Image (spheres, helix red, strand yellow):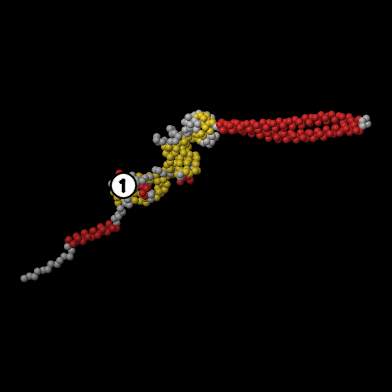
């Protein structure tokens, strides 16, 4: 009887080989996943709900949007030089008026009485000056008369003295008679010198005093004229031709000295008054440009003509005037949206503005791949900005596409799958 042969058991069966092969593949797959696969978080995004913009080179002009209020090119304010009561409203507000035209008439009885008293005092002082001038003339005339009298006596004494001297030398008259004639002549000679000296001094003094009196009188006449003009101040007149504007006034209303009663607007041209954040004060200068675009697409250039240094509520005010043509149809008090230029324009790599900045702070953006199927987070560096563009300094190249809408719904995901 033959013995059964023991069969040798195979170590590597087909099943076992397949099992090991499957495990190896799984191990390789896991290893590949751990080493080479992209572990960044992803999010599916509807491409129709985002805004995509392309990076491009272009002219960059840094500017800030501001609102300007249309004002007349010039305004003359009407303040009450003297207080009083409104007696008459000569012109209605909004009316075009001529230079010197009466606008408002006031009355002030106390002022009128004061003017009358001051006029009376000035007239009295002027009369006193005239009296002083007459006294000077009288003193001069008296000295002139006295000098004439001395000259007359000297003319009589001189021939008499000469005759008496000849007769005395011929011993026809006594010494006493000769000495008497000589004394009369000497006396009148000395007297004439004294009177003439007094007369010359009087003329010099009179010249100085007359000048002082004339100057004083001239000043008093000017004062009198000024006092008379005080009452003219009760009539408010237009200093320039233009449009009269005033708050509501009523007959009988009391007006204080210095109170503003209205203004004259020169409406041949307009300017803008613009409030600018104090942050830009060092960058705003006279001559700086700005622009305004109307609804028809016309662009009007302006320049800064005046900067008011006072800062109120964090803002300062500048005046801007139009260069060349002024927009038609604008009116006083109207608001215009303008662009105030900061610095000079230049070429730059530009990224359009958008809601992404609120989430990323401008430090990173989502950049699309070439086929536009996904967007990846990338660090960037921005420079200056205006309301349309950011200046790109680093991180992006011309032609690349960026998601510029808000990132609020993207969470912390680093890759967006665009569907």
Say which of 178 and 286 sits in front.
Answer: 178
Question: Residue 226, how many percent across, how many down?
Answer: 60, 33
* Residue depicted at x 46% and y 40%: 274
Closest to the observer, 216 or 85: 85
| Relative depth, front residue between 336 and 250 | 250
Residue 77 in view: no
Q: In the rendered image, which residue does mark 1 sit on?
A: 372
From this viewpoint, is residue 192 visible?
Answer: yes
- Quarter of image, res 18: bottom left
In the shown orientation, is residue 304 left or right of residue 171? Answer: left
Q: Residue at x 47, y 43 (%)?
A: 312
What secondary structure is found at the residue carrying circle 1? loop
**Left or right of residue 300: residue 10:** left
Quadrant of the drawing holding the N terminus:
bottom left
Q: Residues within 10 Å of mark 1 (few under 14, many from 20)?
A: few
Pick out the residue farthest to the left: 1
Residue displayed at 43% across by 40% down: 67
Q: Residue furthest right?
A: 171
Q: Is residue 349 above or below residue 324?
A: below
| Percent x, y of residue 87 | 51, 30
The image shows residue 90 at horizontal and vertical percentages of: 50, 28
């Amino acid at each position: 009887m033959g013995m059964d042969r023991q069969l040798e058991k195979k170590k590597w069966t087909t099943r076992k080989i397949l099992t090991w092969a499957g495990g190896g593949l799984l191990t390789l797959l896991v290893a590949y996943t751990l080493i080479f696969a992209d572990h960044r978080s992803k999010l599916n995004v509807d491409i129709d709900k985002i805004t995509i913009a392309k990076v491009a080179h272009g002219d960059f002009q840094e500017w800030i949007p501001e609102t300007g209020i249309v004002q007349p090119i010039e305004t003359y304010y009407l303040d009450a030089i003297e207080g009083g009561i409104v007696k008459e409203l000569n012109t209605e507000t909004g009316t075009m008026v001529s230079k010197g035209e009466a606008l408002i008439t006031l009355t002030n009885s106390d002022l009128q009485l004061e003017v009358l008293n001051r006029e009376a005092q000035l007239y009295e002082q002027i009369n006193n000056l005239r009296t002083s001038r007459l006294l000077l003339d009288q003193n001069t005339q008296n000295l002139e008369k006295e000098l004439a009298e001395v000259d007359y006596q000297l003319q009589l004494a001189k021939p008499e003295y000469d005759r008496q001297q000849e007769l005395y030398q011929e011993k026809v008259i006594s010494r006493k008679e000769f000495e008497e004639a000589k004394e009369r002549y000497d006396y009148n000679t000395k007297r004439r010198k004294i009177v003439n000296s007094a007369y010359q001094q009087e003329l010099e003094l009179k010249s100085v005093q007359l000048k002082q009196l004339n100057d004083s009188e001239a000043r008093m006449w000017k004062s009198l004229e000024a006092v008379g003009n005080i009452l003219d101040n009760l009539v408010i007149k237009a200093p320039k031709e233009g449009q009269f504007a005033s708050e509501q006034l009523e007959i009988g209303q009391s007006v204080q000295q210095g109170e503003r009663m209205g203004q004259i607007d020169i409406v041949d041209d307009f300017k803008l008054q613009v409030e600018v954040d104090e942050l830009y004060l060092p960058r705003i200068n006279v001559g700086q440009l700005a622009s305004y675009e109307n609804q028809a697409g016309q662009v009007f250039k302006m320049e800064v003509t005046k900067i008011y240094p006072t800062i109120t509520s964090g803002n300062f005010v500048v005046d801007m005037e139009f260069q060349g043509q002024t927009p038609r149809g604008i009116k006083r008090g109207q608001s215009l949206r303008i662009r105030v230029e900061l610095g000079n324009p230049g070429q730059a790599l530009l990224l359009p503005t958008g809601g992404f900045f609120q989430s990323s702070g401008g430090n990173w953006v989502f950049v699309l791949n070439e086929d536009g199927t996904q967007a990846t987070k990338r660090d960037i560096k921005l420079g200056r900005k205006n309301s349309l563009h950011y200046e790109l300094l680093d991180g992006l190249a011309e032609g690349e596409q960026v998601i510029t809408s808000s990132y609020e719904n993207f969470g912390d995901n680093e890759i967006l799958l665009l569907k």
